[in-house]
Amino acid sequence: MFNIQRESIVRAIRHTRPGIVSLLMLMVLLGLLNWLVVNKSIVLYLFYLPVVFAALKWSRRDAVGVAGLAALLVISYAFFVSNEMLTARGKSMIWAELTGWGGILILTAYIVATLKTRIQKALADLQQAYDGVLAILSKFIQPVDTDTEAHCVRVSTWASRIAQELKLGGSQIEATRIAGLLHDVGKTEVSVKLLRKAANLSQEEKERILTHTTRGAALVKPVGGILASIADTVEAHHEKYDGTGYRGLRGEEIPLLARIVAVADAFDAMLSDRPYRKGVGVPEALASVTGVSGADFDPAVVSALQRVVSHDGGEDIFAQLSRTQSVPQVG
Ligand SMILES: [Fe+2]
């Protein structure tokens, strides 16, 4: 019985909104400052802090609720505890000031929360347009790359899951997602006939195909923003960890996102059916990638892929991703 009560108190505290907790803390401060500060009305400005916090963090209704509660607490305090706490002037002035202050506090909560909602909606629209453009762009890359649809989408998903597993920050995970999707964008500038030629490539033809890394970087860099930030990843995604890759970068000289995309690209390529061979199962693909860990791939990235597969079930993800054509979202 006692335990149940204790659990419900703990649960109630855990679910109490931090804005209201801040408000109650400010009430305690109010009491202290009432003794210390000569100009008592200055204390009222402190109540804007939890109200603005609530407006930025939660819904408009919650923010207005916090502002209303703040006004109610202060007016109750002034009425029941110290009706002279705010000013030495007449009582009618005290109530006029308190009413005006409470009204402006509630209005502030309403305006800040409304502006936040509008900004969030504008950002969501922009994100939708941005994902749509990326999806269109990836469809241009796929036909020249392989006959396997959604390879770029799957690479993007594997890469961003590895980035999450490596505990990268939100902006780096987003950059990994985009880099996975567009890593082969430079192939749009190499002839389709050459890209589809499965065997007997001359040295010159191999070199021409490999220029898709530098061509891709040259395409995304002038765009600016996040696309410019993935240019070095696009350029280095065929480097090998031991320095035997295209440009000879070694170990950590290769950008981390490029090391991630390289593993995701190779892993998904092994799983996918190609015109000249059948895709292998997840255990075989994982064993192949692990077999060249430290040579072709960064061991830390390979370990992260192993954890992703063991947590999420690689076969399931692959089957699920093979059915989807849309740009993956990072949760
Ligand atoms: Fe590539």
Image (spheres, helix red, strand yellow):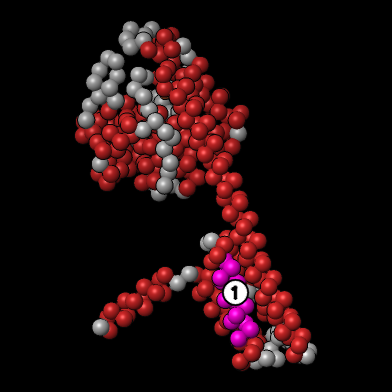
Label 1: which secondary element? helix
Q: Position of residue 231 (x, y in %)?
A: 53, 31
Which one is nearer the viewer's eye here, 79 or 23?
79
Q: Position of residue 90 (x, y in %)?
A: 78, 90
Which one is nearer the viewer's eye here, 298 or 258?
258
| The magenta segment | 63-76
Identify the residue position indicated by label 1 in the image.
68
Q: Is residue 274 above or below residue 282?
A: above
Magenta stretch holds residue 68:
yes
Q: Position of residue 58 (x, y in %)?
A: 53, 62
Label 1 amino acid? Gly
How would you rate the neighbour count of disc 1 (Cα within 10 Å): few for under 14, some for 14-19, many for 20 or more? some
From the viewer's perspective, tell me whether residue 137 is left or right of residue 283. right
Q: Is residue 309 above or below residue 85?
A: above
Magenta stretch holds residue 67:
yes
Residue plotted at (27% across, 14% down) = 276
Q: Is residue 193 above or below residue 48?
A: above
**Residue 54 sits in quarter:** bottom right
Q: Can residue 221 be seen at all in this image of the molecule?
A: yes
Which one is nearer the viewer's eye here, 92 or 186?
92
Q: Position of residue 243 (x, y in %)?
A: 39, 28
Residue plotted at (46% across, 19% down) = 187
